[in-house]
Amino acid sequence: MNAGENEIRMEKPATALRRGWTTGACATAATQAALTALLGGNFPDPVTITLPKGERPAFPLAREVRGEGWALAGIVKDAGDDPDVTHGALVSARIRRIDSGSGIVFKAGDGVGTVTKAGLPIGVGEPAINPVPRRMMSEVVHELCASYGIAPDIEIEISIENGAELAEKTWNPRLGIVGGLSVLGTTGVVHPFSCSAWIHSIHRGIDVARAEGLPHVLGATGSTSEKTAQTFYSLPDIACLDMGDFAGGLLKYLRAHPVPRLTIAGGFAKLTKLAQGALDLHSGRSQVDMQWLADRTSGLGAQSDMTGRILQANTALEVLQITSAAGLDLPAEVASAARATALATLRGAAVEVDVMVTDRSGTLLAHAR
């Protein structure tokens, strides 16, 4: 999810959804409140910030503490109706003045990770605070320091309560971000059930794999097929890209940023949709075409009565059961056609592709390579 946000995907309900605020927006608001208290003596509550697109949300403070030469403000993140692992987390900023000429320095407090691998937008050894949140916080510091007539030599330490535990539910461990969550956000706004954060995480996973010089990456539709393919090839965790339903997001990014070899793994139904040419495999945005399956089965020598049964089938699993009982290798047809879709989407990029189709228990049904 992004590495930390939008990690859990669910069906979008029919009712209007309430949007929320990114971790970066919360960290910026906490920074503004703490620095205002440090320089002026009082914590603004609520604290209002300006987001990159000009919106001005107000955040109530959940925590305010002052010590000798420092101030801390905390805000409880509200992700709206998005199933975000950081929803409800306390995001705090501890602010202190530092030596003249130091500029603005970011530190990872408890629950914020540190970057240990190249390929991310933040350098190795740096706190996992992404560029846009850094810019938002820096703008707050420059503005407030200018208003008090002092140089912006400020240390910003961001912490997220229980962040280390929450990070285990995100991509951070695979991306080489250790010790906690990332401070994310490009607009400051969390749009419920957005696909963009997931695709962004896929892109960052490819960036890290390329920076590490990995020759082989894996994109799987789910954890069962991922485990099968990862074990088959003895791939490290960092090579496993959480493709999910977003085959197009993976393939199009690899087209411009190639890795020598890609394995796509998934269940029969999901990869049937890829074989049909769909690049978004979500059930709400693409469906298994029974006529397509029937045509493929006919090509394998199926009789007309079997074709009729396939056209009347309720699910792809039922089609698989029908054809398997007749000794017809339909998964091989699906794997081959899915590979063809992947290659067509890559448009000649220097990426070798193979496709693995598994059943629900992880048993390998077909392998096109």
Image (spheres, rainbow, N blue to C red):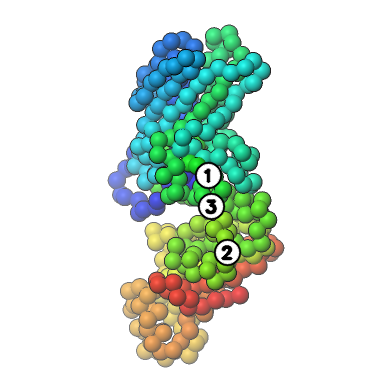
The vertical placement of 332 against 90, above or below, is below
The vertical placement of 335 against 257, above or below, is below
Q: Are marks 1 and 2 in contact (CB under 8 Å)?
A: no
Q: Position of residue 125 (x, y in %)?
A: 61, 38
Q: Position of residue 97 (x, y in %)?
A: 55, 17
* Structural distance between the alpha carbons of marks 1 and 3: 9 Å
The vertical placement of 214 against 175, above or below, is below
Query: Depth check: 341 or 107 in front?
Result: 107
Task: State the residue position of label 1.
Answer: 178
Q: Which amino acid type corresponds to the residue marked 3 in the rendered image?
A: Arg
Q: Residue at x 37, y 81 (%)?
A: 321
Few, some or many residues within 10 Å of mark 3 (<14, 14–19, 20+): many
Q: Which mark, residue 34?
A: none
Query: Depth check: 88 or 147 in front?
Result: 88
Q: Position of residue 130 (x, y in %)?
A: 55, 37
Task: State the residue position of label 2.
Answer: 235
Task: State the residue position of label 3.
Answer: 174
Q: Residue at x 51, y 58 (%)?
A: 243
Q: Residue at x 35, y 26 (%)?
A: 62
What element does badge 1 sit on? strand
Few, some or many residues within 10 Å of mark 1 (<14, 14–19, 20+): many
- Quarter that holds the C terminus: bottom right
Q: Which amino acid type corresponds to the residue marked 1 in the rendered image?
A: Val
Q: Earlier in the sequence, mark 1 or mark 2?
A: 1
Which is closer to the viewer, label 1 or label 2? Answer: 1
* Structural distance between the alpha carbons of marks 2 and 3: 12 Å
